[in-house]
Image: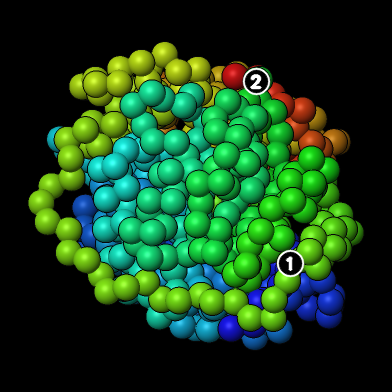
Amino acid sequence: MSTIKLPQDPIPVRRVNVYVTRDVAFDLKKMNEVTAKVLGRLGCDGCHSGRLIDYHIIEDFVVNPATLKIEDLPGGHI
Amino acid sequence: MRPLGVGLIYLPELDSLFREGNPDLSVLELEPETFWEKHYPEGPGGAPAYLPNLEAMARIAALPQRKLVHSVGFPVGGTRCYGGDYASPLADSVRDLDAAWASEHLSFNTVSNPDGLEQVGFLLPPRQTLAGVELAVSNIRRLAGAMPAPFAFETGVNYLKPRADELSDGAFFAGIAEGADCGILLDLHNLWANERNGRQPIEDVLDELPLDRVWEVHLAGGMLLEDYYLDAHSGAIAPELLDIAARVIPRLPNLGALIFEILPGYVPALGLAGVRRQLSRMSELWRLRSGERIVVPRSGAAATHGGEPPEDILQWERTLGALAVGRSPTEVHGTSDLARDPAVAVLRTLIGEFRSSRISRALHFTTILMLASWGPARVRALLAEYEDHCYPDIFTSGEADRFATFLQARLDDLPPAPYLREVLGFEHALVRAALYGERTRLQWDVDPTELFETLEQGRVPAAVGGRKLTMEIVPD
């Protein structure tokens, strides 16, 4: 397979190289952003005993993409 | 040594604050595991190694503030720590940052099951007995002995009701601090949460503590979940807590640092200006302390701890650990009323949110695609099914790997979602390359960048096909 290697920025803890078919027109910058988004978030959570809201943010965004903003959670429900 | 001053937990979202010459920001406290990756050099099933992000560490070390290290992954209150050598990279981070001292939590996050060690994905309260004091003392002396700086433990949050068969919170902390001959990280927000949730009042805790061992104070904001006040690190410090701190700080002769904690997800709501306001208020509090020098000694020599931990503590951990992750305990601790403590439901909710958040972080596009295709109720049901099926992993990579494996095995039985197999395969391949050094070849019949752009808008991609692309994911 004739391939090119995607750039990596920022470089994650362990470099993971992504090769794609050379003869396909391809948005390398976009693919690099997507790859960095996954590889840049693999560590451990910080110290707290409260609510981690990353999932809720995505859920709210998908349900109503026009309101992609973070707001105070008013306590929520069990 | 000279006291360090007022500071912040380091987050990339707060990085600019550390570079602007703010006189109210003298201390940077790093949670090093947030900049580690977990890796299994021998593949799945082997012992994990923990790899620090050296580039990030070098950047942080170069910031002008004095440094502290606050470990978050390997608490000192339990019988077990999850596998692998974590003490060496932790000691490296203390050395690399020239940290004045290091600290860890007085909690447990691992349980010993017949099949091996499992994580519970949360800092759970330890068994608060004399035997629990001995166990924590032994753990602290061992970890402190491996650190190139003095060591302190953090006074933990505990949502459970106080028990007749346990020591008071203050007596428990005091016994450990004296026994381990170590420092105390007095988390006033934790103690305030404990008091508000029905545990020992702060003033009574303080009356039992050796206050000359308090080197550091944490302050934070919190929120309510039903009737529970959570140590959520979710915003500004409440005025009541500022008042408490103003009464406590003059009583702490060796106070060396006053630190504000906030989670990344809540920074946008408070804003950088809001964080600056917290630092300014804390600087006013800092002026209430006295003394130009503090005494922060190293702990004594590591003690040897012989034999197995007491069965009572092992049963406590297995029972509370199982309940907290929503499983039926295979055995019931003598204190079987644990299952009736309403805090167990709170722990389950919080642990579930931790897990779904880790999954959505590493499997970002997979999560959007599932939500856009199936709706929130179906995705939440799937996440709940996964949580019943697998124990948590405190590393985002580990949790994402487990969920991706679970999801891949069910793809044929789930409703259609365009390109879910490809998107999941791509993100899982990146995670497995980092975790296990695995190499993966993927075939796309759509331009993945167009696909990801559609998902970033929260929309279901159209099943167009027609583009053929081969992708190889190859770890160094």
Q: What amino acid type is highlighted by mark number 2?
A: Asp
Marks 2 and 1, how far apart in space? 35 Å
**Image side of residue A37 versus residue B416, left or right:** right
Give me the residue at 57% from left, 47% from top.
B206
Secondary structure under the numbered disc 2 in the rendered image: loop
- Residue B465 percent location from the top left of the image: 59, 42
Seen from the viewer's position, the closer of residues B389 and A18 is B389
Relative horizontal placement of residue B129, taking residue B101 as reference (left or right): left
Check disc 1 and report the residue beneath it. Answer: B289
SS category of the residue bearing label 1: loop
**What subunit carries mark 1?**
B
Answer few, some or many: residues within 10 Å of disc 1's Cα (few below 14, many 20 plus, some between 14 and 19). some
Depth check, front residue: B309 or B39: B309
Q: From the image, tell me which residue sits under label 2.
A: B227
The quarter of the picture where residue B286 lies is bottom right
Dividing the picture into quadrants, the one containing residue B6 is bottom right
Evaluate whether residue B316 shows in this view. Answer: yes
